[in-house]
Image (spheres, rainbow, N blue to C red):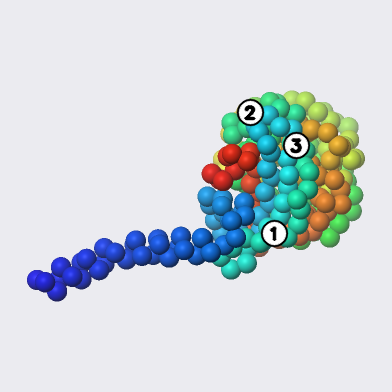
Amino acid sequence: MRRTITLLATMALLPAAAATGGNTARAACPPTLANQLADTGSATQLVTVVSARKTATSGMLRAWEKRGECWAPVAGSWPAWLGQRGISENKREGDRTTPSGAFGFQRVMYGLGPNPGVRYRYHHIVCGDWWVEDSLSPFYNRFKHVRCGSKPPFRITSEDMSKSPTSYRHLAVIDYNTNPIVPGRGSGIFLHVSHGNPTLGCVSLALPQLLTILRWLQPAKQPLIVIGTRASIRRF
Protein backbone atom coordinates (compact mmCIF):
# COMPACT_ATOMS: atom_id res chain seq x y z
CA MET A 1 0.00 0.00 0.00
CA ARG A 2 2.81 2.40 0.85
CA ARG A 3 4.45 1.74 -2.51
CA THR A 4 1.16 2.50 -4.32
CA ILE A 5 0.73 5.80 -2.47
CA THR A 6 4.28 6.82 -3.35
CA LEU A 7 3.75 5.99 -7.05
CA LEU A 8 0.51 8.00 -7.19
CA ALA A 9 2.15 10.97 -5.55
CA THR A 10 4.99 10.87 -8.09
CA MET A 11 2.56 10.75 -11.02
CA ALA A 12 0.63 13.70 -9.65
CA LEU A 13 3.77 15.80 -9.76
CA LEU A 14 4.54 15.10 -13.43
CA PRO A 15 2.26 17.75 -15.02
CA ALA A 16 3.58 20.39 -12.65
CA ALA A 17 7.14 19.44 -13.50
CA ALA A 18 6.41 19.60 -17.23
CA ALA A 19 4.77 23.00 -16.86
CA THR A 20 7.72 24.28 -14.86
CA GLY A 21 10.09 23.07 -17.56
CA GLY A 22 8.12 24.93 -20.24
CA ASN A 23 8.11 28.12 -18.22
CA THR A 24 11.82 27.79 -17.62
CA ALA A 25 12.50 27.46 -21.36
CA ARG A 26 10.37 30.52 -22.09
CA ALA A 27 12.02 32.50 -19.30
CA ALA A 28 15.41 31.77 -20.89
CA CYS A 29 14.41 33.69 -24.03
CA PRO A 30 15.22 37.40 -24.32
CA PRO A 31 12.32 39.47 -22.94
CA THR A 32 11.39 40.88 -26.35
CA LEU A 33 7.81 41.48 -27.45
CA ALA A 34 7.61 38.34 -29.60
CA ASN A 35 8.75 36.15 -26.71
CA GLN A 36 6.00 37.61 -24.51
CA LEU A 37 3.04 36.87 -26.80
CA ALA A 38 0.48 34.49 -25.31
CA ASP A 39 0.32 31.94 -28.15
CA THR A 40 2.06 31.80 -31.52
CA GLY A 41 1.08 28.19 -32.16
CA SER A 42 3.25 26.36 -34.70
CA ALA A 43 4.36 29.52 -36.52
CA THR A 44 8.08 29.96 -37.13
CA GLN A 45 7.72 33.37 -38.82
CA LEU A 46 6.02 36.29 -37.13
CA VAL A 47 5.12 39.90 -37.93
CA THR A 48 4.14 42.22 -35.08
CA VAL A 49 2.38 45.55 -35.55
CA VAL A 50 2.18 47.67 -32.40
CA SER A 51 0.33 50.97 -31.97
CA ALA A 52 0.46 53.31 -29.00
CA ARG A 53 -3.32 53.16 -28.44
CA LYS A 54 -6.50 51.89 -30.10
CA THR A 55 -7.19 55.18 -31.88
CA ALA A 56 -3.67 55.55 -33.32
CA THR A 57 -3.56 55.45 -37.11
CA SER A 58 0.02 54.18 -37.29
CA GLY A 59 2.25 51.71 -35.52
CA MET A 60 5.59 49.95 -35.75
CA LEU A 61 6.05 46.73 -37.70
CA ARG A 62 8.73 44.16 -37.00
CA ALA A 63 9.53 40.69 -38.37
CA TRP A 64 10.73 37.76 -36.28
CA GLU A 65 11.72 34.14 -36.82
CA LYS A 66 11.74 31.19 -34.43
CA ARG A 67 15.18 29.96 -33.45
CA GLY A 68 14.90 27.02 -31.10
CA GLU A 69 12.36 27.98 -28.45
CA CYS A 70 12.83 31.72 -28.87
CA TRP A 71 11.85 34.44 -31.32
CA ALA A 72 14.67 36.49 -32.84
CA PRO A 73 14.24 39.82 -34.73
CA VAL A 74 15.03 39.73 -38.46
CA ALA A 75 13.68 43.04 -39.86
CA GLY A 76 12.25 46.38 -38.72
CA SER A 77 11.21 48.24 -36.73
CA TRP A 78 9.39 50.18 -39.49
CA PRO A 79 6.48 52.64 -39.42
CA ALA A 80 3.23 51.15 -40.72
CA TRP A 81 -0.11 52.82 -41.41
CA LEU A 82 -3.29 51.45 -39.85
CA GLY A 83 -6.99 52.26 -40.25
CA GLN A 84 -8.30 55.82 -40.22
CA ARG A 85 -10.04 55.00 -36.93
CA GLY A 86 -7.25 52.95 -35.42
CA ILE A 87 -7.58 49.27 -34.54
CA SER A 88 -10.41 47.19 -33.10
CA GLU A 89 -10.97 43.70 -31.70
CA ASN A 90 -14.59 44.00 -32.86
CA LYS A 91 -14.18 45.19 -36.41
CA ARG A 92 -17.26 45.74 -38.60
CA GLU A 93 -17.56 46.25 -42.34
CA GLY A 94 -16.88 49.88 -43.26
CA ASP A 95 -15.81 51.05 -39.79
CA ARG A 96 -12.32 52.01 -41.09
CA THR A 97 -10.48 50.17 -38.33
CA THR A 98 -7.75 47.57 -38.71
CA PRO A 99 -8.60 44.30 -36.93
CA SER A 100 -6.60 43.58 -33.80
CA GLY A 101 -5.52 40.02 -32.99
CA ALA A 102 -3.40 37.19 -34.38
CA PHE A 103 -3.95 36.11 -37.99
CA GLY A 104 -2.29 34.02 -40.68
CA PHE A 105 -1.75 34.95 -44.32
CA GLN A 106 -3.76 33.57 -47.23
CA ARG A 107 -2.01 31.30 -49.72
CA VAL A 108 -2.10 33.70 -52.69
CA MET A 109 -0.40 37.08 -52.98
CA TYR A 110 -1.60 39.66 -55.50
CA GLY A 111 -0.27 42.63 -57.40
CA LEU A 112 -0.52 44.88 -60.43
CA GLY A 113 3.23 44.59 -60.77
CA PRO A 114 5.06 41.43 -61.84
CA ASN A 115 5.85 38.77 -59.24
CA PRO A 116 8.63 40.35 -57.15
CA GLY A 117 10.01 36.97 -56.11
CA VAL A 118 7.57 35.82 -53.43
CA ARG A 119 7.32 32.20 -52.26
CA TYR A 120 3.52 32.16 -52.46
CA ARG A 121 1.30 31.68 -55.47
CA TYR A 122 1.05 35.08 -57.14
CA HIS A 123 -1.92 36.48 -59.02
CA HIS A 124 -1.34 39.36 -61.42
CA ILE A 125 -4.26 41.78 -60.94
CA VAL A 126 -6.21 42.71 -64.08
CA CYS A 127 -9.34 44.72 -64.87
CA GLY A 128 -12.35 42.97 -63.38
CA ASP A 129 -10.58 41.65 -60.27
CA TRP A 130 -12.51 42.43 -57.09
CA TRP A 131 -12.36 41.71 -53.38
CA VAL A 132 -16.04 41.49 -52.47
CA GLU A 133 -17.18 43.87 -49.70
CA ASP A 134 -20.93 43.16 -50.01
CA SER A 135 -21.84 41.29 -46.80
CA LEU A 136 -25.02 39.95 -48.45
CA SER A 137 -23.12 38.34 -51.30
CA PRO A 138 -22.12 34.64 -51.32
CA PHE A 139 -18.70 35.91 -52.45
CA TYR A 140 -18.26 38.16 -49.38
CA ASN A 141 -14.64 38.59 -48.29
CA ARG A 142 -13.39 36.59 -51.26
CA PHE A 143 -11.53 37.36 -54.47
CA LYS A 144 -13.84 37.39 -57.49
CA HIS A 145 -13.12 38.09 -61.15
CA VAL A 146 -15.85 39.41 -63.45
CA ARG A 147 -15.59 40.43 -67.09
CA CYS A 148 -13.79 43.77 -67.38
CA GLY A 149 -16.29 46.60 -67.57
CA SER A 150 -19.32 44.46 -66.70
CA LYS A 151 -21.56 45.06 -63.69
CA PRO A 152 -20.54 42.76 -60.81
CA PRO A 153 -23.17 40.47 -59.25
CA PHE A 154 -22.71 42.16 -55.88
CA ARG A 155 -23.01 45.64 -54.37
CA ILE A 156 -19.87 47.67 -54.92
CA THR A 157 -18.49 50.33 -52.58
CA SER A 158 -15.15 50.88 -54.31
CA GLU A 159 -13.45 50.39 -57.67
CA ASP A 160 -12.01 47.08 -58.78
CA MET A 161 -8.50 46.21 -57.62
CA SER A 162 -6.88 47.26 -60.90
CA LYS A 163 -7.82 50.89 -60.16
CA SER A 164 -5.39 51.06 -57.20
CA PRO A 165 -1.98 51.02 -58.90
CA THR A 166 -0.05 52.26 -55.88
CA SER A 167 -1.66 50.40 -52.98
CA TYR A 168 -2.07 47.15 -54.87
CA ARG A 169 1.23 47.06 -56.71
CA HIS A 170 1.98 44.13 -54.39
CA LEU A 171 0.03 42.78 -51.42
CA ALA A 172 -0.51 39.88 -49.04
CA VAL A 173 -3.98 39.01 -47.76
CA ILE A 174 -4.28 38.90 -43.98
CA ASP A 175 -6.42 35.89 -43.09
CA TYR A 176 -9.07 37.80 -41.17
CA ASN A 177 -12.75 36.77 -41.01
CA THR A 178 -12.30 33.61 -43.04
CA ASN A 179 -12.94 30.57 -40.85
CA PRO A 180 -15.84 30.98 -40.95
CA ILE A 181 -16.62 34.11 -42.95
CA VAL A 182 -19.08 36.13 -40.87
CA PRO A 183 -21.17 38.65 -42.83
CA GLY A 184 -20.47 42.19 -41.71
CA ARG A 185 -17.30 41.44 -39.74
CA GLY A 186 -15.01 43.05 -42.32
CA SER A 187 -13.39 42.15 -45.61
CA GLY A 188 -10.30 42.70 -47.71
CA ILE A 189 -7.69 43.20 -44.98
CA PHE A 190 -4.38 43.47 -46.79
CA LEU A 191 -0.72 44.16 -46.10
CA HIS A 192 -0.07 46.52 -49.00
CA VAL A 193 1.95 49.48 -50.28
CA SER A 194 1.62 52.72 -48.32
CA HIS A 195 0.20 55.95 -49.72
CA GLY A 196 1.75 57.78 -46.78
CA ASN A 197 -1.53 58.09 -44.90
CA PRO A 198 -3.99 55.93 -42.90
CA THR A 199 -5.83 53.08 -44.60
CA LEU A 200 -9.46 51.98 -44.73
CA GLY A 201 -8.63 49.04 -42.45
CA CYS A 202 -5.48 47.47 -43.85
CA VAL A 203 -1.82 47.63 -42.82
CA SER A 204 0.48 49.45 -45.22
CA LEU A 205 4.25 49.81 -45.55
CA ALA A 206 6.63 51.71 -47.79
CA LEU A 207 7.29 49.66 -50.93
CA PRO A 208 10.92 48.63 -50.21
CA GLN A 209 9.99 47.43 -46.73
CA LEU A 210 6.86 45.66 -47.95
CA LEU A 211 8.89 43.78 -50.56
CA THR A 212 11.34 42.67 -47.88
CA ILE A 213 8.46 41.16 -45.90
CA LEU A 214 6.65 39.60 -48.87
CA ARG A 215 9.83 37.92 -50.16
CA TRP A 216 10.70 36.68 -46.67
CA LEU A 217 7.35 35.07 -45.87
CA GLN A 218 7.13 31.31 -46.48
CA PRO A 219 3.83 29.42 -46.31
CA ALA A 220 5.54 26.30 -44.93
CA LYS A 221 6.58 28.31 -41.87
CA GLN A 222 2.94 29.16 -41.06
CA PRO A 223 3.60 32.87 -40.53
CA LEU A 224 1.41 34.97 -38.27
CA ILE A 225 0.76 38.69 -38.11
CA VAL A 226 -0.17 39.97 -34.65
CA ILE A 227 -1.70 43.44 -34.39
CA GLY A 228 -2.43 45.29 -31.16
CA THR A 229 -1.65 48.14 -28.83
CA ARG A 230 1.31 48.21 -26.47
CA ALA A 231 -1.14 47.32 -23.69
CA SER A 232 -3.07 44.55 -25.48
CA ILE A 233 -0.79 42.76 -27.90
CA ARG A 234 0.74 40.35 -25.38
CA ARG A 235 -2.69 38.72 -24.91
CA PHE A 236 -2.66 37.35 -28.45
In the picture of the structure, the residue carrying the numbered disc 3 is: 58
**Image x and y of residue 140, in percent:** 67, 34
Which of pointers 2 and 1 lies earlier in the amino acid sequence?
1
Specify whether 159 is left or right of 94: right
* Secondary structure under the numbered disc 1 in the rendered image: strand
Alpha-carbon distance for marks 1 and 3? Answer: 20 Å
**Image x and y of residue 61, in percent:** 73, 47
- Quarter of the image for residue 147 reads top right
In the picture of the structure, the residue carrying the numbered disc 1 is: 73
- Residue at horizontal 66 percent and vertical 55 percent from the top: 46
Specify whether 76 is left or right of 138: right
Which of pointers 2 and 3 lies earlier in the amino acid sequence?
3
Q: Nearer the viewer, mark 2 or mark 3?
A: 3
In the picture of the structure, the residue carrying the numbered disc 2 is: 92
Alpha-carbon distance for marks 2 and 1? Answer: 32 Å
Query: Badge 3 local density, few (<14 within 10 Å), some, or many (20+)?
Result: many
Alpha-carbon distance for marks 2 and 3? Answer: 19 Å
Q: Is residue 128 above or below residue 23?
A: above
* Secondary structure under the numbered disc 2 in the rendered image: loop
Whether label 2 touches label 3, CB < 8 Å: no
Identity of the residue furthest to the left in this view: 1
**Image x and y of residue 3, in percent:** 14, 74
Q: Is residue 138 visible?
A: no
- Residue at horizontal 65 percent and vertical 32 percent from the top: 54
Q: Amino acid at mark 1?
A: Pro
Q: Amino acid at mark 3?
A: Ser
- Quarter of the image for residue 122 reads bottom right
Q: Nearer the viewer, mark 2 or mark 1?
A: 1
- Residue at horizontal 73 percent and vertical 40 percent from the top: 59
Between 221 and 84, which is closer to the camera in this rendering? 84
Whether label 1 touches label 3, CB < 8 Å: no
